[in-house]
Image (cartoon, rainbow, N blue to C red):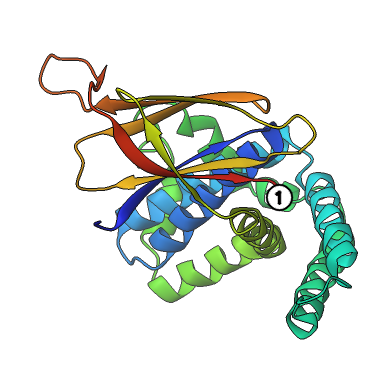
């Protein structure tokens, strides 16, 4: 079997927001390593997307609740036979450390960045296609033309308030993804449906399929039941359609 392609589907709004931020943080890191004007434009655009999510969600509170939940769960299993206590103590220490850093963060995260006149002006024009041209935002054009060292300094200052948030999200999602073992399943004629145990708090679905197969997984559902349809990619004017063949795949229903 070739290297699999993994499709993930969050089963609640909290995890959905965390996963969106995770993707945006990965993009931010990628573009910050670049040195061209398009790279730096992309950095600012991604940073504005992150700040938009922050403005709509109380991320600090949500992350602290999730970190506390994981700490309680790990403490419950600490006395179980076969548990690597040294590794568990290190994980609990990491959880406590990041929780303290978040708790000690004053005010709403990201607010200080948006207080910048430059960011406010870019934010107002960013939703307009091509709205951040040099004739629209000469101050932004000036910043884009500065030397790399100066720009990197500014980017480091702007992204500093996000470091603890990113670390917490990475830690939480890592725990969730590793919380359950995968099971081998078969989608008859490209279709699979399963009801979830209502007594368990499922967080995330992970569907792993052979990347050599010409198909993609379309997942829908909620915390009690979900459906997977394996679809053929669109070609020309043809829309994607559910394939007729049986598809073997790996399913992980993450609980932690």
Which residue lies under the disc numbered 1?
Answer: 110
Whether residue 126 sits left or right of residue 160 in the image: it is: left
Quadrant holding the N terminus? bottom left
Would you place residue 237 above or below residue 145 in this image? above
Would you place residue 60 above or below residue 231 in this image? below
Viewer can see residue 105: no
Report the label total: 1
Residue at (73% x, 52% y) in the render: 112
- Foreground of the two, 180 or 136: 180
Whether residue 16 sits left or right of residue 236 in the image: it is: right
Q: Quadrant of residue 161?
A: bottom right
Residue 66 position within the rendered picture, expressed as x and y whole percent measured from the top left: 80, 50
Residue at (47% x, 57% y) in the render: 26
Q: Is label 1 in a helix, a strand or a loop? A: loop
Residue at (48% x, 31% y) in the render: 125
Would you place residue 24 above or below residue 34 in this image? above
Residue 96 position within the rendered picture, expressed as x and y whole percent measured from the top left: 85, 70
Would you place residue 24 above or below residue 121 in this image? below
């Amino acid at each position: 079997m070739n290297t699999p392609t993994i499709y993930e589907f969050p089963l609640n709004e909290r995890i959905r927001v965390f996963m969106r931020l995770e993707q945006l943080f990965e993009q931010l890191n990628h573009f910050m390593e670049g040195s061209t004007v398009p790279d730096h434009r992309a950095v600012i655009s991604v940073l504005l997307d992150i700040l938009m999510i922050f403005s709509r969600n109380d991320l600090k509170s949500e992350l602290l609740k999730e970190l506390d939940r994981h700490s309680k769960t790990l403490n419950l299993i600490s006395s179980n036979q076969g548990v690597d206590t040294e590794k568990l103590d290190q994980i609990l220490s990491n959880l406590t450390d990041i929780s303290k850093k978040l708790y000690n963060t004053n005010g709403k995260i990201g607010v200080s960045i948006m207080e910048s006149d430059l960011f406010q002006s870019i934010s107002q024009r960013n939703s307009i296609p091509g709205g951040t041209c040099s004739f629209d935002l000469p101050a932004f054009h000036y910043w884009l033309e500065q030397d790399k060292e100066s720009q990197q300094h500014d980017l480091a200052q702007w992204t500093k308030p996000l470091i603890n948030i990113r670390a917490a999200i990475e830690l939480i999602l890592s725990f969730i993804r590793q919380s359950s073992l995968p099971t081998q399943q078969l989608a008859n004629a490209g279709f699979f449906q399963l009801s979830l145990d209502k007594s368990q708090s499922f967080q995330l679905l992970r569907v792993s399929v052979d990347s050599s197969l010409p198909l993609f997984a379309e997942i829908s559902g909620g915390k009690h039941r979900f459906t997977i349809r394996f679809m053929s990619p669109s070609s020309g004017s043809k829309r994607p359609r559910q394939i007729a063949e049986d598809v073997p795949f790996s399913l992980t229903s993450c609980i932690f």
